[in-house]
Every structure is written in structure tokens, then in C-alpha cells.
Amino acid sequence: MTAESNSIVRAGELLTKLRTQIGNALVGQAEVVDQIIIALIVSGHVLIEGVPGLGKTLLVRALAQAMSLRVSRVQFTPDLMPSDITGHAVLDSTTRELRIVRGPVFTNVLLADEINRAPAKTQSALLEVMQEYQVTLEGETLALPKPFIVLATQNPLETEGTYPLPEAQLDRFLLKIDMSYPSLEQEIDIVARTTTDQTGDQLPLAGVTPVLNERMVLALQQLVARQRVDKAVLDYAVRIVRATRDWPGIAVGSGSRGPIALVRAAKAAALMAARAFVVPDDVKGVAMAALRHRVALSADAQLDGHSADDLIRAILDSIAAPRV
């Protein structure tokens, strides 16, 4: 077995341990956990949509604790200013010079809670952070620590007092994850965990132990970048995305960031399976999360009760996967 093969096997084992540690805190949501890990190891950002109380904050805290990473949480509100997240300059009374105060974006994992409640100006500031991985304050460019990932949440039910994310910002998210209600058995387990030997609303993170650190996460990102993608699989991913541009019920299809996100996420899925190459099932497995926020439905499709997932699923069913 080659050194590269050993690295792939070792990476698969580490990611399985990471999944297990997060599961020690978060009951269920296995697909959500896998997609968050995928985004992390390709240095991508995630938009999580779900009603309150499903464990979004717990998921982020468990992820950070399992990797010994720094985490910051920003509650987005209509009066939130760009400087509240990026930082600002203050006059030092002793030296009479401007001193840079770094904002909460200078972290490894940023939880942007209810991101659609902030005005466009603040959302734009975060867009620069997500795209450039840096902040410019008083003419000085400051690089963000690595790894860096934004996990943004939004409530799909409450729209009053919100500012819908512009298409340009949605496109910067590698994945959009829909977080659903747990099953009956899972919810019973959740209630048991949070009401046994627990006081108040403390997050149950005692069972989460670190299995990765910053250096190891960066090494995994480099390993993902070297994953092999056969030309036939690449063609398959591109054809899926191109089909969204003239599919009945889709008014606006995905741009070129769509196939890029699809392939990047598929490479991470392959690494999680301890493979050095991508197969069509890897592409299929991440297609919903990679594309659902990159398409806009027609009015007729919405009136008929169709969702983006319905139409993407139909596209996947219509395009034959290659044999590799």
C-alpha cells in the first residue's frame, strides 16, 4: 500500500471518529453531520435552514469541540453593523494611536445565527469574508485564521423583519442543508439526554472529545484537493447542472459555481468513504445540498407545490450515471 493510500485510509478513520464524537452530543441528523464535515474538509461554507430547536447551535459547538477549534456565534439582528462582525478601530487613550479591535469573524468556526435578519450592508461585509478569507480594517488587510468556515442559519417560517439573502451571497455557500424534525425514537433520546443530570439549558457536550486539530484539518483539506475525478464523472456532474438551466419548472438554473461545488463536495464524500477517487454516487449524494439554493423555481412550479429538491431529484433520475 502506497503512502497516499495509507493517508486516505487514515483520513477515512479520522472522519468516522469525528462523526462519532459529534453523535455523542447530537442525536440523529446523520446526513446533516456528514454534509457539515464535507464542507469543512473542502473549506466551504454552509447555510442551514430549519425551525428553532433542532440542534443547530449544538451541532456547531460539538463540531468545534471535536476538533479543538475556536468558535464564535453572532446573532444577526436588523441593527447589526458590519463592524460588529469584522471589527473596528478605536483610539488608544495612552498612545493616541488607532488600535484594531478584531471582530468575531477571527475564528475557525463562525455561527451566523439567523443571517437573513441582518440588513444588506452587513450581509455584504460577511460576503467579503467568505470569499476572500480576509478583512480590511483602516486600510490594513488581516487574514483570517485557517481553517475557517461559516455556518449560517435561517428560519424558513418567519419572514417578517428579514432581508432575503441575495443570489450572489447564496451562491457563496457550498451547501444548503435542510434540517428536519427528528424521528420519534430520536426525540425520545434527545429528551432523555437533556433532562437527565442536566441543569438549565446547557448544551450536552461532556461526551465530545477532540479527535482533530487545526493542523490535521488543513492536512485533510489538502488530501481532498488531490482526490481523483474521472473525466466521465466530471462530465456527469456538469450535465446535471446544465440540465437545471432549461428544466421545466426551473426559472433560473445554476451558474458555473454549481458544478464546481458539486465536484468539490463529491471529492470530500469520497474521502469520507476512504476512497482516493470519486464515483457517480458521490455526486448524487451531495447534489441536493449543492444545488437547491442555486436554482429559482417558476411561479407555476411553486403554485403546483413543487420544491427545488423535487426538480433536482427528477433531473438526477433522468441523467444516466457513467460506469467507472
Image: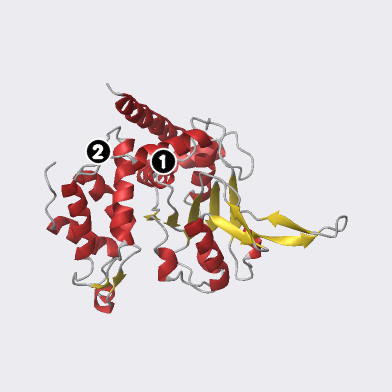
Disc 2, SS: loop
Locate residue 59 relative to residue 306 in the image: left or right. right
Disc 1, SS: helix
Point out residue 3 in the picture as x, y percentages from the top left corner. Answer: 33, 24
Choose between 99 and 82: the one closer to the eye. 99
Point out residue 227 in the picture as x, y percentages from the top left corner. Answer: 30, 39
Point out residue 271 in the picture as x, y percentages from the top left corner. Answer: 32, 37
Amino acid type at mark 1 = Gln
Quarter of the N terminus within the rendering: top left
Residue lying at the far bottom in this picture: please name it. 299
The circle on residue 193 is none
For disc 2, the marked residue is: 277
Is mark 2 in CB contact (under 8 Å) with mark 1? Answer: no
Image quarter for residue 38?
Answer: top left
User: Mark 2 and mark 1: span between their CA atoms?
Assistant: 15 Å
Q: Residue at x 53, y 41 (%)?
A: 64
Q: How is the image coloured?
A: secondary structure
Choose between 284 and 230: the one closer to the eye. 230
Q: Residue at x 19, y 44 (%)?
A: 230
Whether residue 84 is situated above or below residue 39 in the rendered picture: below
Locate residue 319 relative to residue 193 in the image: left or right. left
Locate residue 277 relative to residue 124 in the image: left or right. left
Locate residue 177 relative to residue 99 in the image: left or right. left
User: Is residue 114 shown to the viewer in this render?
Assistant: no
For disc 1, the marked residue is: 221
User: Is residue 228 shown to the viewer in this render?
Assistant: yes
Report crowding for label 2: few under 14, some 14 to 19, many 20 or more residues within 10 A (C-alpha). some
Residue lying at the far right in this picture: please name it. 94
Quarter of the C terminus within the rendering: top left
Amino acid type at mark 2 = Phe
